[in-house]
Image (spheres, helix red, strand yellow):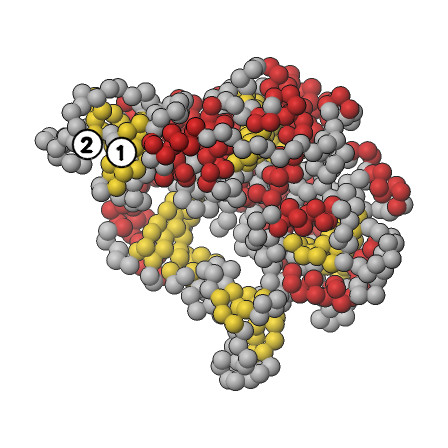
Amino acid sequence: MNPALDAPAAHLVQVAVSTPAHSAVGDLLSYANPLPLAPGTLVRVPLGTREVLGVVWDAADAGPTLPPGMAPRAIAGVLPGIAPLDAAWRRLVAFTARYYQRALGEVALAALPPQLRELTAEQLARRLRRPAPALPPLPQAGEDGGDAAVGDIKLSADQESVTAQINAHPGPFLLFGSTGSGKTEVYLRSVQQALAASPTAQALVMVPEINLTPQLEARFRARFAPLYGEGAVVSLHSGMTNPQRLKSWLAAHSGQARIVLGTRMAIFASLPGLALIVVDEEHDASYKQQEGARYSARDLALWRGRDRGARVILGSATPSLESWHASSPASEGGPGRYQRLEMPGRIGAAELPRLRLIDMGQQPRGAVFAPPLVAAITERVERGEQCLVLLNRRGFAPVLHCHACGWKSDCPHCSAHQVFHKIDRTLRCHHCGAAQRVPRACPGCGNPDIAPVGRGTEQLEEQLQQLLRNVITPERRAARVARIDADTTKAKGALEEQLAQVHAGAVDVLVGTQMVAKGHDFRRITLVAAVQPDGALFSSDFRAPERLFARRMQAAGRAGRDAHYLATQQSRPELWLQTWHPEHAIFAALRRHDYPAFAAGQLTERREAGMPPFAHQALVRADARTQEVAQAFMQAAAEAARAAQLPGSDQVFLFPPVPLAVQRVANVERAQMLLESPNRGALQRFLAAWQPLLHAERSRHKGLVRWLVDVDPQGI
């Protein structure tokens, strides 16, 4: 603050700005302005030697008054042409900051488009005067990504029933529909009904992955652009350029965009007419932010819907156990907070894939693909069908190893291995990004015979190309194998181009990571194979079985989605799993496609163990130059909390601090401490009262880089 006024002013204005993390600066700062400003107004204000973006906040939320003799600095300017952010948006930001233990200004400014934070008032005014660029032409009905008119689509009995219930009740709803059951059409109908009810109504539709937004946008634009105009549907996700994000945000804020499609960041879109929120694949961990304010977009969607009186639809074939429990009626021992809607059948009477388990203990030693799986893939390709092979590990092999001296390709900056990428002969760390050329000989002993250990998608692609080199398709051409993962989709438009080739039938076997296993509608894929599904069977993370089941069910859902195509091919969809533990109970539930039974068993175990959703958790994570400093900081903070007898401390249990699974990343040591309580309110009161003690302890531990609180963590 400047002791002198920068300009004469009569009104004190409270402004939310993004202040440095762990600073002693409050949530709201006081500035002076000649005229009163409405809450929600976007302004540029001085902060230290910089000029930053801020949001005028409600005076009732003001923090401590200015010290005697301290005069406020003047607001530098108001951003022109942008209406103030409404009270509902400010309530959402305030709740997020309070619940997830972050600064109000940090959340508020992170929720705005980056370009708003960069543009001056003059630059923004010029930007708003530019004509909007023309959108690409609409796909026609029948084209890939296109959609027929509403009247041309006959709903199944399940879809009719579910749509009627959504229209008749306030929700929130958990739409439990098997893969291929037509959940997207239910979303489209629900959006249609919400927009038709009011000329200012808006809908927010969220998906977990960026790569799912283009195909969804094509369907929504084809359905709604003829009704509401070309600009009625916009997207919001981090894969867009800053100007694109600003354009979409402004369209939503002004009400011009009636439908916003996006990933987790879209939950903070300014939507004055919000009437419906759809969260597709609600179980997906991608809805939990892992940097900065670690919010859950799914949970915020429920809060925002309740606050705004908007309907909320959570959809999934494998709901999160938290949502499944919340939708369980009282007769089943659940709270019944959500209304559960079920669509067990697939569209067009398409059958669910049959599970085929391969016991790798009975297969040739060292085989990447079991002979029965190779035979099954060969048979499908020769019939003109497509196959999908999944492995959630990119690169050629996870590590290079010298059998003579035991050397491994460890990352010099992380407690992890550098992954071998054969395509460009590099070793890359997937944690810090460090890369180097593959050595000609072992750096430890000079042995030239260093070998890859383990498997990645590059190796699967190479092996399949070799195994299928003599396989001929019905078009009298050689079988084609393609790979889609984070390495092959770096270039702009690369993912869309590769997916288009799969849809067009130019690819016979697709190798990919989990990014292609959810949400995509591959009409000709009849066989899906998971090569290494055992990794999560014996994990220390209590959520691992839930994630394994969901991933395998979602993967199976990519097979056999077109009943007509299966009938013409006289084929049956299959999911093949290569495992060393075929007798495991998870595989028995997968064989029956019985998610309710799996969920019941998991919830029983969690209730007995006092795990979420029957308890509530938070993590304190610390990064430091040494592991000792990180753990000492958390231990001291825990002791200070016990000594202070903070509110709720009698219901909060603090576990001892421990290193993270990947202990060191980019030469920074990481540790965490788990907090658990049977009462969410007690945990929140404790965390809020603990914040000043954490700030105080930070200054006493030299070498501490940063710390954060993660409420409702998804990985422990």
Q: In which quarter of the image is residue 52?
A: top left
Q: Residue at x 90, y 45 (%)?
A: 570
Q: Which residue is drawn at 24% across and 36% down?
A: 46
At label 2, the amino acid type is Arg
**Are discs 1 and 2 less than 8 Å apart at CB?**
yes
The furthest residue to the bottom? 446
Residue 350 vs residue 140: left or right?
right
Vertical comparison of 1 with 406: above or below: above
Q: What element carries label 2?
A: strand
Expressed as whole percent of the image width and height from the top left, the position of residue 573 reads: 81, 47
Numbered mark located on residue 501 in the image = none
Q: Which of marks 1 and 2 is nearer the N terminus?
A: 1
At label 1, the amino acid type is Val
Expressed as whole percent of the image width and height from the top left, the position of residue 53 reads: 32, 35
Expressed as whole percent of the image width and height from the top left, the position of residue 58 reads: 31, 23
Which quadrant, please, contains the N terminus?
top left
| Of residues 641 and 709, the one drawn nearer to the viewer in this rendering | 709
Vertical comparison of 264 with 128: above or below: below
| Of residues 505 and 369, the one drawn nearer to the viewer in this rendering | 505
Q: Dot 2 corresponds to which residue? A: 73
Numbered mark located on residue 45 in the image = 1
